[in-house]
Amino acid sequence: MHPILGNLRQLSLYLAAWSPLAVILFYILKSAGGLSWVQAFAMIPLLCLVYAFMCLSAWYTCRGTPLATSSLSRLALTHGAGALVISGIWVAIAKGWASALASIETFRGLDQQFVPDYPLLFASGVMIYLLAVALHYVLLSIEFSRELEKREIQARVLARDSELKALKAQVNPHFLFNSLNSISALTSIDAGRARDMCIRLADFLRRTLGVGEKAVIPLRDELELVRSFLSVEKVRFGARLSVEESVEPGALDFAVPPLLLQPLVENAVAHGISNLTEGGWIRVAVSNGQGSDSSAEDLRIEVENNFDPEMPRRRGHGVGLSNVRQRLATRYGDRARFEVRTEGERFHVSMVLPAEKVETVA
């Protein structure tokens, strides 16, 4: 659709821009054309209104002859012919309007008096039409720039979504590899516990399938996934694994990317608890706008565990941390913060991300 006709505000501005042209035509017909100011005033408003809409047809010829790909001769021929045809039609309309006015006593003889002004009106119409052509090329350029910007934004969104899906796809295989190793070890020690672990693992994987295609889920659902994951690990570690939760109830409905906490908790188990003979603990804390570097619009999530600082790093250490860091950066950019630090025998991971409700997230 025509960009001016499809927008009431732009149409109003376009018609308002004809006011100076109407004044110029009024002056030309009154001074050079020999009409009285009453006759010129009777002719000009309708002629300008009609020609304003006629000049909008230049949009279609401009689209058919783009500046970037059309030769100079084609441009001149197309728009020159358009100017002659449109101006000719306009003069014919002016002739008809003058004849109609001549039937009124006040404007008696106007149709004959206006005949010498036809060439002047025709030349004015050609110039105005060519101005309309220039205007429409500007509009086309703006539309093209907006379309390029829109495509660029869409490309960035698609690239971001693809990256998020690729990063998310790393989570389950990584965890599944560790779990299957644990089940394999348990089969020769305690077949009952191995079977129990298989059942709990199947339940966890079933839960992850329900959120795998979602961009975000409520924090309460993410915590359920973490609990399901830890129930698998507790089969293996028993009393050696202690879990503590501190979650503000008001934060449970905020949106988080799915499987955001599970890699952090898995990292705490694999590189912390599993290396401690006497076992260890994991603490998960969630607050809304608490802490010196948070605000009321922030969701703060912390995962902390004890570990043996003298234990050498195992192969694959940091895969989960890197995955979470990249997913936060890809989805939120600089609106999210991710920090990892050690304090003696404590390993601490904290995230601060925008506190968004699930229903408000696009």
Image (cartoon, rainbow, N blue to C red):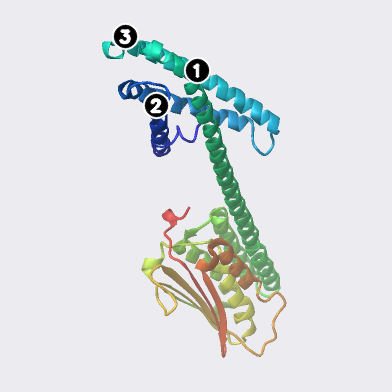
Q: Amino acid at mark 2?
A: Ser
| Quadrant in the rendering for residue 307 | bottom right
Compared across the picture, whether 284 is left or right of 159 comes to: left
| Of residues 238 and 280, the one drawn nearer to the viewer in this rendering | 280
Name the side, left or right, on which 155 lies relative to 315.
Answer: left
Alpha carbon distance from label 1 to label 2:
24 Å
First reached walking from the N terminus: tag 3 or tag 1? 1
Q: Is residue 224 above or below residue 300?
A: above
Q: Position of residue 277 (x, y in %)?
A: 62, 86
Indicate which disc residue 103 carries.
3
SS at mark 2 in the image: helix
Residue 17 horizontal/vertical position (percent):
42, 37
Q: Is residue 321 above or below residue 61?
A: below
How many residues crowd mark 3 within 10 Å: few (<14), some (14–19), many (20+)?
few
What amino acid type should be assigned to the residue bearing mark 1? Ile
Name the residue: 56% across, 21% down: 84
Specify which label sits upstream in the sequence, 1 or 2: 2
Q: CA distance from mark 3 to mark 1?
A: 22 Å
Answer whether labels 3 and 1 touch (C-beta < 8 Å). no
Frontmost residue, 113 versus 187: 113
- Image coordinates for residue 149, horizontal then vertical, percent: 58, 49
Q: Which residue is mark 2?
A: 31
| Disc 1 target residue | 89
